[in-house]
Image (cartoon, rainbow, N blue to C red):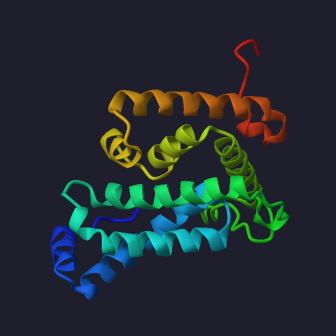
Amino acid sequence: MASELSNEPALIAAARRGNLNAFNTLVLHYQDRVYSFAYRILGESAASADAAQEAFITAYRRLDTYRGGSFRAWLFRIVSNLCYDELRRRRRRPTSALDDLPGGETDDGPAIPAADLTPEQAVQQRELLRAIEQCIDGLQMDQRLVILLSDVEGMNYQEIAEITGANLGTVKSRLSRARSGVRSCLQAVKELLPSSYRLKDKSE
């Protein structure tokens, strides 16, 4: 996870006074995480870049509504709302562009493996990451959002509650169901995984 900005409160205060340079510093700090998060929801590079750009424009225009607390959570709530607005538009006007699907030509692919892995281990890691991503993609929207925020972005329950507008109990329940769903999904596709990563049945 990227390091936190030590002077973030000062930058936010300056940006609220109209200092564009201060806001641009915030953009540079968060832009990769915001894009990555949008991509995990939308699964398409161009749409994710558009969502990230629109999120920062919206954030700048709405800085007067920021009331303190986690700026990251406030920003991610904006981008998550934009992403789900886009998904709702897609459902109203469905498309079948194969290149927009995970694995298509516009798919950025899995994260680059660590340099100390052997070629075989790198391939296994990619296959595992791909399987996990596909299982997360299959979750219901509310469960998908909380597991991305928690297990990918590393946010705590309070930040997730602020982003989703749900109470802490609901966040914990959704996260529990999401993790259970991913485990069940991986169990169902275990034959597609490298043998060293396959989940074992209790009876085995």
Q: Position of residue 162 (x, y in %)?
A: 33, 46
Q: Position of residue 106 (x, y in %)?
A: 74, 71
- Tell me the quarter of the image containing the N terminus: bottom left
Closer to us: 203 or 166: 166
Q: Is residue 129 left or right of residue 65?
A: right
Q: Is residue 69 above or below residue 194?
A: below
Residue occupying the point 52% across, 48% down: 148
Q: Is residue 86 left or right of residue 67?
A: right
Q: Is residue 139 left or right of residue 155?
A: right
Residue at far top of view? 203
Closer to us: 175 or 67: 67
Count the marks: how many? 0
The image quadrant of residue 118 is bottom right
Q: Position of residue 121 (x, y in %)?
A: 72, 53
Residue occupying the point 62% across, 53% down: 88
Q: Position of residue 166 (x, y in %)?
A: 38, 37
The image quadrant of residue 169 is top left
Residue occupying the point 46% across, 48% down: 149
- Tell me the quarter of the image containing the C terminus: top right
Residue occupying the point 32% across, 74% down: 61
Q: Is residue 28 above or below residue 197?
A: below
The image quadrant of residue 198 is top right
Q: Is residue 204 above or below residue 9?
A: above
Q: Is residue 152 left or right of residue 74?
A: right
Closer to us: 80 or 43: 80
Closer to us: 130 or 80: 80
